[in-house]
């Protein structure tokens, strides 16, 4: 199947397909100008989608996939990438919690003033 057909069949966003093609992984054969997509491509694309979902940049996703192709010898490197992304996600959660606490504080203050007839 062509990469366009794979994108439609597996609901892969065009942005991911474009990045994947630019990394040079696909294109085992070309038929009528359409890049062919094999089972290995589908497997790699199924890995890339969650990477984007968890916040990997295009470059990070490419590095991760290339490391995956190296096999078990790259497990430590890939784990470090995942741990870094987890730490970034936790920091983001923490900052959002702080913003929410500030928002709640302002809301409570206004609610008190409304209840006391100050506004």
Image (cartoon, rainbow, N blue to C red):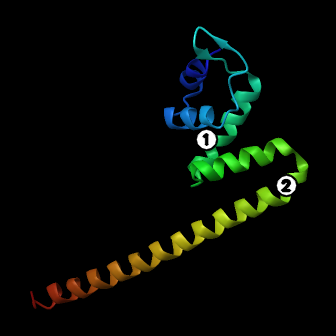
* SS at mark 2 in the image: helix
| Labelled disc at residue 75 | 2
Query: In x, y percent, where is residue 62?
Result: 67, 46
Residue picked out by circle 1? 49
Query: In x, y percent, where is residue 41?
Result: 71, 28
Drawn side of residue 112 relative to residue 12, left or right: left
Specify the quadrant that holds the C terminus: bottom left
In this rendering, the answer to whether 110 lies above or below 17 is below
Residue at image coords 50%, 37%? 15
Q: Are marks 2 and 1 in contact (CB under 8 Å)?
A: no
* SS at mark 1 in the image: helix
In terms of image quadrants, where is residue 28?
A: top right
Residue at image coords 84%, 60%? 76
In terms of image quadrants, where is residue 25?
A: top right
Specify the quadrant that holds the N terminus: top right
Work out which residue is located at the far right of the displayed protein and give it: 73
Residue at image coords 14%, 91%? 116
Residue at image coords 63%, 45%? 50
Q: Earlier in the sequence, mark 2 or mark 1?
A: 1
Q: How many marks?
A: 2
In this rendering, the answer to whether 74 lies above or below 29 is below
């Amino acid at each position: 199947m062509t990469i366009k057909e794979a994108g439609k069949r597996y609901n892969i966003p065009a942005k991911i397909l474009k990045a994947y093609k630019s990394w040079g992984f696909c294109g085992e054969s070309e038929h009528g100008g359409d890049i062919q997509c094999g089972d290995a491509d589908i497997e790699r694309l199924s890995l890339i989608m969650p990477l984007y979902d968890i916040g990997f940049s295009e470059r990070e996703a490419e590095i991760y996939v290339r490391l995956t192709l190296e096999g078990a010898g790259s497990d430590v490197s890939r784990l470090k990438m995942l741990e870094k992304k987890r730490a970034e996600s936790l920091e983001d959660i923490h900052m959002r919690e702080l913003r929410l606490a500030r928002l709640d504080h302002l809301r409570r203050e206004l609610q008190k003033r409304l209840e006391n007839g100050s506004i």
